[in-house]
Image (cartoon, helix red, strand yellow):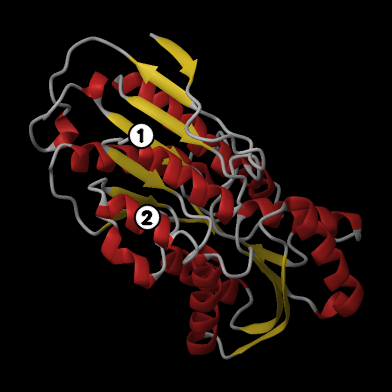
Amino acid sequence: MTFRANKLGKPLAAAAMVAITTMAAGAQDAPDWLGGELQKPLSETKIGITVLYPGSNAYQAKYAETAEAYSEELGIQATVMDPQGDPAVQFDQIQDMASQHPDALVVWPTSQNALIPAIRNASRNGIPVVTSNSPIGEAGRRYIVGHTGPDDCAQAEQSAEMLGDALGGAGKIVVVEGTPGYTVSILRKNCFLDKMADSYPDIEILASQTAEWNREKAQTVMETFITQYGDEIDGVYAFDDGMGLGVVSALQGAGYEPGDIKVVTCNQFGEGWDAMKAGWMTGTNKQSPIDDAILAIQTAIKVANGIEVPELQGIETPKVTPENVDEFERPTW
């Protein structure tokens, strides 16, 4: 099996583009998970994949890596692209990939609404589109065949429960958010706030600020919170483990000890697993980029072969706490 660069359409100078085409011969029996017959050999199946921003954190990097490796394993022709979180670049990527007439597209959206015209165009031209990880805006859902990924609202509610219980139902917290306007950020914020208001009314939110899914920015945000509020802070909710690790760095720099301030996140990383074992993290949930990517690709192959798929397919995201962390393998991302 060989890999070759496959540059689609016009150059996208604003983006780092990863274009991997895998082609393999071999047995073309339908895999067990397909649930139907292959309409063409897997080696002739073409899937275009555009991933939010693999360079931004370990989860997205592992997702892109898995997409390439799993495509190679299956023997399909898959092009994996990185828009670097830029909706305009991803819009062009979708248009360019669609012009190559693939059998399906997988889109991890950079924006709720900015991509809808490109997704609509692909759909209207008979190319099935699967969104992955982050849902597209309501107005665009008629143009996709299905969505795969975690339930971000459920994760946020889990985080609210873990932080609320750790604080005994009362205290003051700060929140470190993801990128404003991004679907996952909206869900992980609103569902957390709703659960807090409904179940833990005696917990006060002192401040909430974005760190744009960036670990270093999260450290800076937390340092500012410490300067402003000091020992008033009883707990922190960060939208993902990468930002949670930035929070931990700020706490360490300010002289806090493990457990002095309860830190809860979504989506545990390997270093977050270590931090939980060391007492710095109070709660999170398991979310696998490997499962995330594989489910999206399997779904794309199903629709490429005319097999119906559910509108929504999720991956498991169980709670992880110091009490059960040893039940989970340390994440490799």
Residue 217, position as x, y percentages in the image: 78, 57
Q: Nearer the viewer, residue 308 or 156?
A: 308
Q: How many marks?
A: 2
Q: Residue furthest bottom?
A: 201
From the viewer's perspective, is the residue at label 2 or at label 1 nearer?
Answer: 1
Compute the Cα span from label 2 to label 1: 14 Å
Q: Residue at x 85, y 54 (%)?
A: 252
Name the residue type under label 1.
Gln
Q: Residue at x 13, y 20 (%)?
A: 29
Q: Which residue is mark 2?
A: 119
The C terminus, quarter of image: top right
Q: Which comes sooner in the sequence, label 2 or label 1?
A: 1
Which mark is on residue 100?
1
Q: Residue at x 64, y 40 (%)?
A: 55
The N terminus, quarter of image: top left
Which mark is on residue 263?
none
Name the residue type under label 2.
Ile
Can you say whether 153 is above or below 266 in the image? below
Give the secondary structure at mark 2: helix
Q: Residue at x 66, y 51 (%)?
A: 242
Residue 200, position as x, y percentages in the image: 55, 85
Residue 332, position as x, y percentages in the image: 56, 33
Residue 52 vs residue 261: left or right?
A: left
In the rendered image, which quarter is residue 42 located in? top left
Residue 34, position as x, y percentages in the image: 16, 35
Residue 228 vs residue 132: left or right?
A: right
Residue 22 vs residue 265: left or right?
A: left
Q: Residue furthest left?
A: 37
- Label 1 environment density (alpha carbons within 10 Å; few <14, some 14–19, many ≥20): few
Residue 138 vs residue 312: left or right?
A: right
